[in-house]
Image: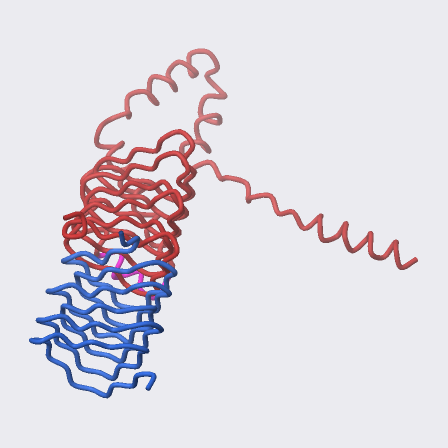
Amino acid sequence: MASANLSIIGRTTRVRGRVTGAVDLEVQGFVEGDIAVSGDVTVDANGIVGAGVRGRRLVVRGAVKGDLVGEEAVSLEDGARVVGDVRAPRVAIGPGALVRGFVETGEANGAPTRASRSAQGASRPQTLARPVAPAARSTTAKTAGPQPPPIAASSKTAAKHPGTAEKANGPAAGRPPRRPPPPVVPALKKVKGQIAKRKER
Amino acid sequence: MASTVIGTGITVEGEITTDEDVVVAGTLRGKLSAKEGVTIEHGATVEADIVGGSLVVAGALTGNVTAAERVDLQSGARVIGNVKAARMTIADGAQFKGNVDMDV
């Protein structure tokens, strides 16, 4: 009865390849390929998935290295370790869940993700997927109209400091603030080398 | 109680390696290596080479089988492939085409 509706990749089981189908799936072991089912997918605390997971509702308590796409919802619970993008109408990240990737909620999970997935084929997913959402956000922000606040702000500052207002506003409005590059820590290597040299001496 | 279940409606394309019991009720293409029992249920479609401790087939299997203990083809099973096992039974009503290699 359970086996009729639920499929289980057991704890000591490794699957190298695709898993597809129309029923619920529980991963307690290791899957090294895409999972695409129309039912629910549970990645257990001991479960490891090395590729993308697509399903109706995804519950993750284990490790996933790949994109999570839920038709209805994605729930990352305590113990979840996800490296990859998360997309679903509802995304829940519980306490104790670790995520590194782009998370997007809302209805935009159907066709666009499939398109981007097929487009990803050759190139890396992140580089293609990431620029889309910020652009969309900025357009919505423009149409929604936080336009008044800047004017008000500038008029305020202009009243206080008529000369400096444009200077202050100019560069900030023209260019988005650039983030400094992430800190590179080659110091360790250098230090090691130095230590080695010192030892040589 | 099997720990790994490939349920009805699930398709696995690739390789499965496990130390525990496996029940296949869905579709499997590729390869299956298990240390314990493997059950291919009625309605399942398996196109894979199977290595396991023991094997019970009630569904359709195309592929070579190597079992440490025994292979049982139940009524309604359709098996095409060579079987190498210590013991083997073919129930009345099972279809089988292939070589059998038992410890004689």
Coordinates of residue B18 in the picture (x, y in percent): 37, 62
Magenta highlight on residue A119: yes
Region of the chain picked out in magenta, as a range: A115-123
What kind of secondary structure does the magenta stretch mostly adopt? helix
Relative height, residue B45 to residue B65 (above, below): above
Instruction: Identify which residue, A153 or B39, lies in the foreground.
Output: B39
Q: Is residue A174 visible?
A: no
The answer to whether residue A199 shows anywhere in this view is yes
Chain B: what color?
blue
Q: Residue at 33% of width from left, 53% of height from top?
A: A10
Residue lying at the far right of the rendered structure: A201
Measured as percent of width and height from the top left, residue B1 is found at 27, 51
At which x and y percent is residue A87? Answer: 27, 43
- Looking at the image, residue A122 sits to the left or right of residue B7; the answer is right
Q: Compare residues A23 and B99 and report the one nearer the observer.
A: B99
Between A128 and B63, the residue placed more toward the observer is B63
The picture places residue B7, in percent across and down from the top left corner, at 19, 56
Question: Above or below — where is A150 with respect to B94?
Answer: above
Which chain has been coloured red in this picture?
A
The part of the image, by quadrant, that contains residue A104 is: top left
Q: Would you say A117 lies left or right of B58 here?
A: right
Question: Quick one: which residue is furthest to the top in this view?
Answer: A160
Count how many numbered circles sit on residues in the image: 0
Q: Is residue A96 magenta?
A: no
x 14%, y 72%: residue? B60
Relative vertical location of residue A149 with respect to residue A28 in this rendering, above or below: above
Q: Going 16% across and 85% down the picture, which residue do you hit? A: B97
Q: Quadrant of residue A99?
A: top left
